[in-house]
Image (cartoon, rainbow, N blue to C red):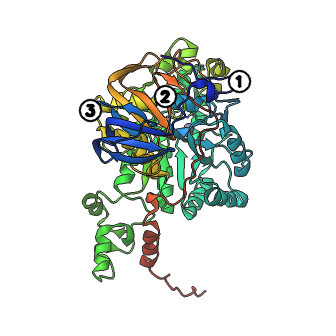
Amino acid sequence: QSNQFCEAGIGYGEVGCGLSSSTKLLIKGGTVVNAHHQEVADVYVEDGIIVAVKPDLKVTDDVKVIDATGKFVMPGGIDPHTHLAMEFMGTETIDDFFSGQAAALAGGTTMHIDFVIPVNGSLIAGLESYEEKAKKSCMDYGFHMAITKFDDSVSRDMEIMVKEKGINSFKFFLAYKGSLMVNDELLLEGLKRCKSLGALAMVHAENGDAVFEGQKRMIQLGITGPEGHALSRPPLLEGEATARAIRLAGFVNTPLYVVHVMSIDAMEEIAKARKSAYFPNCTALYHPLCNLSLSKGISKPFLWDSKQGCKMYFNCQILFKTLGQRVVGEPVVSGLVLDDSGLWDSDFATASKFVMSPPIRAAGHNKVLQGALSNGILQLVGTDHCVFNSTQKALGIDDFRKIPNGVNGIEERMHLVWDTMVESGQISINDFVRVTSTECARIFNIYPRKGAIIAGSDADIIILNPNSSFEINAQSHHSRTDTNVYEGRRGKGKVEVTIAGGRVVWENNELKVVPGSGKYIEMPPFNYLFSGIDKADASYLSSLNAPVKRSKPTT
Ligand SMILES: NC(=O)NCCC(=O)O
Ligand SMILES: [Zn+2]
Ligand SMILES: [Zn+2]
């Protein structure tokens, strides 16, 4: 397998690469798989757009024809969680917007959403810096924005991001005390602002204060190696922060997206919230039985207690399983397929490559997270691709707290999800498309432009051969890093062709990528998770009794 980019001169040029100048493509005879449907059909592409999906399409001689017989033709992957060229922990991730995206394309991912980090709290300065970094993009990308402080100016800039810059999600780090971490007061302000703008609030859910304490404990015990990283931030701190963020989002009544769900503890909080609502008080609004009685003209819902609220709460939960908080859970591929054993490796370079936050958990968590992905508790898979080479990881040779946090995955995600989830029979091929592409497009409001193979969608397409196999190693991967946390893994199912924006960029194990060819994808606010939120709020307000009139106590 080649790990060479097609390079002409100093840059990466179209001319010397033998890139197809054809803007017309026909993918013939494959099984076209969307999240809700599959059929044997041809896919015709012109000028970067899918024009037709039908059996037996006839085309003229100037059209490049790709035979996909016996293979699956699917939407290119969309990675909702990456960090390319991010300055972090005293260094910068080694994959930039060119090398990281080239690696993604070689693995069947055709779009990613990266996190803009504000500069000294300024969103505008942060965005300008990321716009500069992204100029070398060779595939489509979008941005989330981190919020690290909150004041009137940040609040105003959040509006600019949403209304003018195409950003519809903001991330709050509850970890990384002293750098990115925010407290509950800021989180609450942020959640309220997100709600008013129709933007999705995202959280990195670990209790940063407790992690800080855990780290001190490990150092006092003399545990300075990479295993100290896992020991200092156990699953319960992820569970606590996940629960807290969910409850605060419930209190504000705004949707929440929990990034990199790594533990059973966090997953269970998400499961619980998606099944039943956490609202400030048990009021008629949120309990269907009470609503029912209200709608029948009964002024006080039945079994209503003026002090304790709705006595039917428990029954409501049991009878109306679908009632639930709008919480999205994103596992990442490392959390789904790895366990923490590598962190105990006696070789520092090997152990440190597994350091990420929240940590990769003990064996067992991964299998349970796979189950939660297959039954819909978790909805889409990211990577948190955040890569440092072994020299950078060695910044923490004497102290695990200084090891830059992050692992690779942008190139490996599609193969590992296919092999782990589809080959094992845990999810269908349609669900593979849903969790790797379509659901991300829906959540970030760019469906069906992305995430679908239908007429009118962008021509971001992969051809996967289920009878072929893949093998992962640092020698042949396309990331700039010198290690790979999936080193030596083999599996079934291989992305043989990647088409990005109507251009064949990966074929015959060769990349043909052009810096500057990727487009910024603006993402509008008010995705489907916001639908009905305003009605629920109005109904809540109207259900409140008028304030009790009290006379002033006489002295
Ligand atoms: N996850 C990680 O270890 N590094 C990237 C930053 C983050 O997402 O927390
Ligand atoms: Zn994070
Ligand atoms: Zn991340």
**Label 2 packing within 10 angstroms: few (<14), some (14-19), many (20+):** many
Q: Earlier in the sequence, mark 2 or mark 1?
A: 1
Residue assigned mark 1 = 10
Relative image position of residue 34 (x, y in whole percent)? 34, 44
**The C terminus - image quarter:** bottom right
SS class of the residue under badge 2?
Answer: strand
**Amino acid type, label 3:** Gly
Q: CA distance from mark 2 to mark 1?
A: 21 Å
Q: Quadrant of residue 414?
A: top left
Residue 106 relative to residue 60: left or right: right
Q: Nearer the viewer, mark 3 or mark 1?
A: 1
> Is residue 386 something that shows in the picture?
no
Q: CA distance from mark 3 to mark 1?
A: 46 Å
**Residue at the location (50% across, 20% down)?**
343
**Residue at the location (54% across, 32% down)?**
385
In this view, 424 is above or below 145:
above
Q: CA distance from mark 3 to mark 2?
A: 28 Å
SS class of the residue under badge 1?
Answer: loop
Relative image position of residue 118 (x, y in whole percent)? 69, 46
Task: Name the mark on residue 506.
Answer: 2
Q: Nearer the viewer, mark 3 or mark 2?
A: 2
Residue assigned mark 3 = 425
**Amino acid type, label 1:** Ile
